[in-house]
C-alpha cells in the first residue's frame, strides 16, 4: 500500500514526454492572492485536499453502483496521508474515482466558476478582508500552494490503463505527462516551502485530521508511530486510522458537539467561516430520512448568478452519495442552504431521471423545507441573540423573498420572515416585519402600502408619499430588483391587502374623514375645466388627467393603472430588453399648488400648452423616469425661468 503514496524524490522533474501548459489568467491571479492573504490560515490545505479525496471516493462509490468494474477489485475505500521528512513532502492519497488527462486539464488549471473575473475584481487588497472573501469563493485545490512551492498530482481514473502526472510550482505553468499508476485514484504531493516543516511532524498532521476531518465518512490513515525499540530494529510502520470515520449525520445528536457540526460543515460546504446555524433531524415513520442542514454566515459571491452552482445539499441513500443537484432537494429560494439529506427508502440504484419526478423525494424536500423555515423562524424569534437573524436577513433576505413567488404553500410563513425598510423606520436593522407594520397601522387604515423604486432615496422622496406622510401612514420602501415581481404575487398578508402607492385611484378608506372627502370632491368639481384643458394639451402622452389625492407639496405626479404595471416595473422590463407597449400613465395634479394655480390662470394657448408639458415632464423625472426629449424640457424650463425673472424685474 505504502509504495504509491509518495511519488517523487526531492523536487519533481517533469519527464521527457511532459507537455507544458499555461494556467488560465484568473488562476494565476487567484493563486498569488491566495498565497498572500490566506497565509494565516495555511492549514486549510489539509481540509481542502481531504475533502476532495472524500468527494472522489463518494463519486466512485456512486458510479460503481452501475459499473462494478470501476472498483478494479478494490472496494476498500480509503484516504492515506504520508509524511516524508527526507524529501520534505506531505502527500494525500485516495483510491477514489481519479481523473483522466482531459479531466485534469479541465479541473486543475482552470476555474470553471462563472463570475470569477468579477469576483477577483471585487477583492480589496486588504489581506484580512480578502482572506474571508477568498474563503467564501472556495479555495479548494489551490490552497496546496500556500504551504508548497511545488505540487505534484498523480492520478488514474478507475477503468483506465494509464495515469497522468501534473506538476506545477504555482507560477503560471504546469506540465502534464503520462505515468504508470498501479492503484486507481489520486495522490497529491506537496513539496513544502522553506518554513513549513511543522507539517512533517506526525502529531501536527494527526491533530489537523482530528480537528478538521474527523467525520469524513472514510478512514483516513497515517503511519503508525513506532517505539524507539521498533525503530532500532528497523521495523516498517504500518497504517492506522486516525479519524472517527463515521458519517456525522448518522450519529445521535446527543453525541455531537457544536465543534463537530462546525467542522463537518466546513468540509461539506468548502466554506471557510463557521455556519450561522443548523438543524439536524432524524425523521421516522412512513418515510425514514435524516437531514443535516446548515445556513452559512455569508452569501456566496454568485448567489444571484443564474449560472452559479452552489455546493448546496447533497443527497445520500443509505450513506451512499447520490448527487448534489441542489434543485431537487431545495427550492431555488433556499439555494444558500448546505448540508446532507440521507434517505433510507430511495432505491440505491436511483438515477437522475428517476429522481426527476419521485414522490418520495418530493416529500423529503417538502419536509426539509419546513425544517429550514423553522430554523429561520427560531432565529427571528430569538430575543437573546438578535444578531443572528440580522445577519441572516441582510445576507439572504432578498433570496428568501423569491419564495413568495416560488413556494405558494409556504407563502405566509415566508412573508412573516421578511423585513422591510419603511417610511417610519428606514434605519431598522434588519427592517420592519409585516406584523410590526400591521400593529402600528393608523385607525381606519385597511391596506398595507408600499412603493417600489430603484434606490432608497428615490423611494423616500417620491411625491406619491406626501399624503401618507401627512397622515402618518407607514409605507414599505421596496428597492430590491425582485420586489416588483414578488409584489405581483403577494396580494395580502393576514387578511390585509397590499396596495402600491403609485397605482390606481387612491382610497385611504376610513383613514380620511368625511370632511376631507367632501373637500376633495369640491376641489374636483372646481378643477374640471383645468383638468380638461391639460388633457387636451397633453393628448396621447397621458391616459387620464385627474385631481390628486396623494399630493400635498408637489404640483403633479404620475400614477399607473390599478391593475397595470407600475412605471418602475415598465422601466425594469425595458432595460431587460423586453418590448413594451407604450402605455400612457395617468397624470394627477394638485390644484392648490401655486404652480398649478398659475397654470390655471394662464390665458395664452401656447404658454398653457408649454406649461402643461413641463408639469408632466417633471412628474416623469420625479418618478425616476427618463424623458424622451430632454432638450425640449430644458428649453421650456428656461423660457419659464426667463418669464418669471422678467416678471420679477
Ligand atoms: N483527489 C481528487 N480526486 C479526483 N478529482 C479531484 C481530486 N481533487 C480535485 N479533483 C477535481 O478537481 C476539481 C477542482 O478541485 P477544487 O478543490 O479546486 O474545487 P472544488 O472541490 O470543485 O470546489 P471548491 O473550490 O469549493 O473547493 C474538483 O471539482 C474535482 O473534480
Image (cartoon, rainbow, N blue to C red):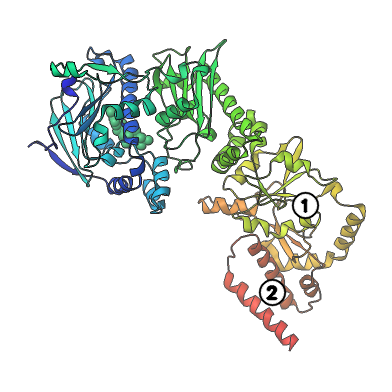
Q: Is mark 1 within 8 Å of ligand 1?
A: no
Q: Dividing the picture into quarters, in which one does residue 439 lie?
A: top right
Task: Report whether 623 appears left or right of 600.
Answer: left
**Residue nearer the viewer, 535 or 61:** 61
Identify the residue at horizontal 35%, vertical 31% (top origin).
47
**Up-down relation of residue 109 to residue 634 (above or below):** above
Q: Which residue is mark 1?
A: 505
**Residue nearer the viewer, 553 or 145:** 145
Identify the residue at horizontal 62%, vertical 72% (top origin).
633
Residue 93 horizontal/vertical position (percent)? 25, 25
Q: Quadrant of the C terminus?
A: bottom right
Question: Mark 1 against mark 2, which lies toward the viewer?
Answer: 1
Residue 59 horizontal/vertical position (percent)? 33, 22
Q: Secondary structure at mark 2?
A: helix
Residue 95 horizontal/vertical position (percent)? 25, 21
Q: Which residue is mark 2?
A: 610
The residues tagged by marks 1 and 2 sit, at their Cα atoms, a distance apart of 26 Å
Residue farthest toward the top in the current orientation of the protein: 286
- Quadrant of ligand 1: it is top left
Q: Could you classify mark 2 by the number of other residues whose Cα lies within 10 Å: few (under 14), some (14-19), or many (20 or more)?
A: many
Task: Report whether 488 appears left or right of 553.
Answer: left
Residue 175 visible? The answer is yes
**Up-down relation of residue 419 to residue 637 (above or below):** above
Residue farthest toward the front in the current orientation of the protein: 229
Identify the residue at horizontal 58%, vertical 33% (top origin).
406
Q: Is mark 2 within 8 Å of ligand 1?
A: no
**Up-down relation of residue 417 to residue 120 (above or below):** above
Task: Report whether 582 appears left or right of 20.
Answer: right
Q: Dividing the picture into quarters, in which one does residue 81 lie?
A: top left
Residue 103 visible? The answer is no
Amino acid at each position: 500500500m505504502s509504495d504509491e503514496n509518495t511519488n517523487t524524490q526531492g523536487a519533481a522533474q517533469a519527464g521527457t514526454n511532459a507537455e507544458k501548459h499555461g494556467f488560465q489568467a484568473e488562476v494565476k491571479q487567484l493563486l498569488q492572492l491566495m498565497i498572500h492573504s490566506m497565509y494565516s490560515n495555511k492549514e486549510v490545505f489539509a481540509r481542502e485536499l481531504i475533502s476532495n479525496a472524500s468527494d472522489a471516493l463518494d463519486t466512485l462509490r456512486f458510479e460503481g453502483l452501475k459499473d462494478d468494474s470501476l472498483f478494479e477489485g478494490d472496494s476498500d475505500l480509503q484516504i492515506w496521508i504520508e509524511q516524508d521528512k527526507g524529501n520534505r513532502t506531505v502527500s494525500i492519497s485516495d483510491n477514489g474515482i481519479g481523473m483522466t488527462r482531459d479531466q485534469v486539464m479541465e479541473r486543475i488549471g482552470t476555474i470553471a466558476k462563472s463570475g470569477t473575473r468579477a469576483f477577483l475584481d471585487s477583492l480589496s487588497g486588504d489581506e484580512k478582508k480578502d482572506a474571508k472573501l477568498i474563503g467564501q469563493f472556495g479555495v479548494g485545490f489551490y490552497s496546496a500552494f500556500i504551504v508548497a512551492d511545488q505540487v505534484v498530482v498523480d492520478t488514474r481514473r478507475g477503468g483506465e490503463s494509464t495515469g497522468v502526472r501534473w506538476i506545477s510550482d504555482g507560477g503560471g505553468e504546469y506540465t502534464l505527462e503520462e505515468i504508470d499508476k498501479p492503484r486507481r485514484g489520486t495522490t497529491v504531493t506537496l513539496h513544502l516551502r522553506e518554513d513549513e516543516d511543522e507539517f512533517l511532524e506526525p502529531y501536527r498532521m494527526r491533530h489537523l485530521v482530528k480537528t478538521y476531518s474527523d467525520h469524513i465518512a472514510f478512514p483516513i490513515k497515517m503511519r503508525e508511530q513506532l517505539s524507539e525499540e521498533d525503530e532500532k530494529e528497523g521495523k516498517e510502520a504500518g497504517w492506522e486510522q486516525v479519524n472517527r470515520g463515521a458519517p456525522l449525520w448518522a450519529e445521535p445528536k446527543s453525541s455531537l458537539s457544536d465543534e463537530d457540526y462546525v467542522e463537518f460543515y466546513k468540509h461539506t460546504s468548502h466554506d471557510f467561516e463557521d455556519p450561522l446555524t443548523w438543524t439536524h433531524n432524524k425523521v421516522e415513520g412512513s418515510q425514514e430520512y435524516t437531514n443535516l442542514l446548515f445556513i452559512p454566515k455569508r452569501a456566496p459571491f454568485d448567489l444571484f448568478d443564474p449560472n452559479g452552482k452552489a455546493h448546496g445539499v447533497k443527497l445520500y441513500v443509505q450513506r451512499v452519495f447520490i448527487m448534489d443537484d441542489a434543485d431537487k432537494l431545495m427550492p431555488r429560494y433556499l439555494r444558500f442552504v448546505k448540508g446532507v439529506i440521507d434517505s433510507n427508502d430511495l432505491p440505491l440504484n436511483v438515477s437522475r431521471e428517476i429522481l426527476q419526478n419521485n414522490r418520495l423525494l418530493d416529500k423529503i424536500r417538502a419536509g426539509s423545507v419546513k425544517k429550514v423555515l423553522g430554523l429561520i423562524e427560531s432565529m427571528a424569534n430569538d430575543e437573546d441573540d438578535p444578531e443572528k437573524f440580522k445577519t441572516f436577513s441582510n445576507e439572504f433576505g432578498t433570496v428568501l423573498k423569491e419564495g413568495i413567488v416560488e413556494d405558494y404553500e409556504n407563502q405566509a410563513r415566508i412573508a412573516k420572515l421578511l423585513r422591510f425598510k419603511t417610511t417610519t423606520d428606514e434605519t431598522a436593522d434588519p427592517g420592519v416585519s409585516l406584523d410590526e407594520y400591521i400593529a402600528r397601522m393608523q385607525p381606519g387604515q385597511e391596506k398595507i402600502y408600499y412603493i417600489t423604486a430603484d434606490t432608497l432615496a428615490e423611494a423616500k422622496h417620491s411625491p406619491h408619499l406626501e399624503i401618507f406622510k401627512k397622515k402618518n401612514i407607514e409605507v414599505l420602501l421596496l428597492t430590491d430588483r425582485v420586489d416588483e415581481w414578488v409584489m405581483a404575487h403577494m396580494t395580502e398578508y393576514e387578511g390585509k391587502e397590499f396596495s402600491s402607492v403609485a397605482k390606481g385611484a387612491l382610497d385611504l378608506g376610513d383613514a380620511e374623514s368625511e370632511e376631507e372627502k367632501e373637500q376633495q370632491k369640491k376641489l374636483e368639481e372646481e378643477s374640471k375645466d383645468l383638468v380638461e384643458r391639460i388633457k387636451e394639451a397633453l393628448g396621447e402622452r397621458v391616459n387620464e388627467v385627474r385631481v390628486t389625492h396623494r399630493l400635498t407639496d408637489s404640483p403633479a405626479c404620475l400614477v399607473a393603472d390599478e391593475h397595470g404595471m407600475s412605471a418602475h416595473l415598465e422601466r425594469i422590463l425595458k432595460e431587460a430588453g423586453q418590448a413594451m407597449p407604450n402605455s400612457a400613465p395617468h397624470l394627477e395634479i394638485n390644484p392648490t399648488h401655486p404652480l398649478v394655480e398659475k397654470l390655471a390662470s394662464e390665458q395664452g394657448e401656447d404658454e398653457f400648452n408649454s406649461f402643461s408639458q413641463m408639469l408632466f415632464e417633471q412628474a416623469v423625472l420625479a418618478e425616476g423616469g427618463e424623458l424622451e426629449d430632454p432638450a425640449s424640457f430644458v428649453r421650456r424650463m428656461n423660457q419659464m425661468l426667463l418669464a418669471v425673472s422678467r416678471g420679477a424685474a
